[in-house]
Image (cartoon, rainbow, N blue to C red):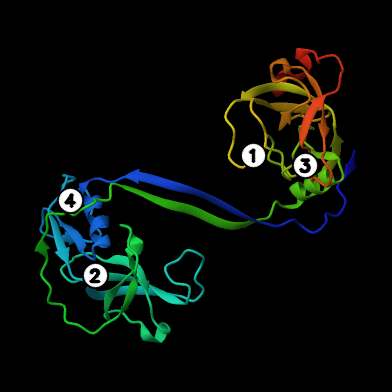
Amino acid sequence: MRTSPPSPETLRAPLTVEFPFTRSLGPVQSAFLTGLRHRTLLGVRTSDRKVLVPPTEYDPLTAEEIRDLVEVAPTGTVTTWAWNPSPRPFQPLDTPFAWVLVRLGGADTALLHALDAPGPDHVRTGMRVRVRWAEERTGAITDIACFEPHESNDGHQPAAHTGRFTDMVTTLTAPARLDYTYTPGRAPTDYLTALAGHRIVGERCPSCRKVYVPPRGACPTCGVATAEQVEVGPRGTVTTFCIVNIKAKNLDIEVPYVYAHIALDGADLALHGRIAGIPYDQVRMGLRVEPVWTEGARYPDHYRPTGEPDADYDVYKELI
């Protein structure tokens, strides 16, 4: 038991959270996206005769379902804008551009998209623009590659449209992605650094005296800062567990396998770990286990039985 020494440089790691989001489309959104594939821009007329682009499925005033589709112009007026000097991956353009709200001819609302312009001095509210269509169109908002400056008059009147096309788009799958840099902080950095040396450390709360692993720099119960570092384990006790029968993508572990809560000796909080070295149907509460590191690994690969007698239930019942 000792007070934490000065931490090494705080760890940092780039992380990406990404998953596909799929939804079915109703008649309005289906017509709008299919129209884009055919270079046709559709809006919807509301009860007060306003034309909404992009179209909504319900009237914002009455909440009634609306399907009165109309075609609007591929030209329009910039109502407001913001310059983007450093485009991120997967944005519409890979060179600096402006995010713009464009009120298309015949529409009463504005559509958000990118404007291809040489610089912010070439963008202004009230400027006239037109759609630049993507060469390959699939029935998505990306069928509009971007807007571009274009001098034209705004005399377009919305025309009724059936919303019917060949090969209607009925579902939409869009990637949801978040790129960020994770910095764990002082206490988790100490924990991860110790793991690299095959040691497991927690921190003791100065108030309730509980030892938390992994440490977070503060007691989750008392809310006070923690600084006293305590080495725990490496052996521990299985408090509860589950048998995994569905193979995870990109995880090279054969099913079934066991994932457990493990209360390390000297810790007051159970952590997660995979149990191996024993048939999955022989894992049980109270089983005594120890970590197994593979060569060069920062984390234990799994926990295996120590061969000790099972722990008494009263020893770990508060950590289930």
Tell me the mark number nearer the camera, choosing from 2 and 4.
2
Instruction: Find residue 207 and report its horizontal and vertical position in percent.
Output: 77, 35
User: Residue tagged by mark 1?
Assistant: 251
User: Residue tagged by mark 3?
Assistant: 299
**Mark 2 or mark 1: whose residue is earlier in sequence:** 2
Tag 4 secondary structure: loop
> How far is the residue under mark 2 from the one under mark 3?
54 Å
The three-letter code of the residue at mark 4 reads Leu
The three-letter code of the residue at mark 1 reads Leu
**Point 12% across, 77% down: residue:** 155
Instruction: Find residue 5 and report its horizontal and vertical position in percent.
Output: 88, 51
Q: Is residue 270 visible?
A: no
Q: Quadrant of the C terminus?
A: top right
Marks 3,4: beta carbons within 8 A: no
User: Residue tagged by mark 4?
Assistant: 61
Tell me the mark number nearer the camera, choosing from 2 and 1.
1
**Mark 3 or mark 1: whose residue is earlier in sequence:** 1
**Mark 1 or mark 4: whose residue is earlier in sequence:** 4
User: Residue tagged by mark 2?
Assistant: 103
Q: Is residue 31 above or below residue 242?
A: below
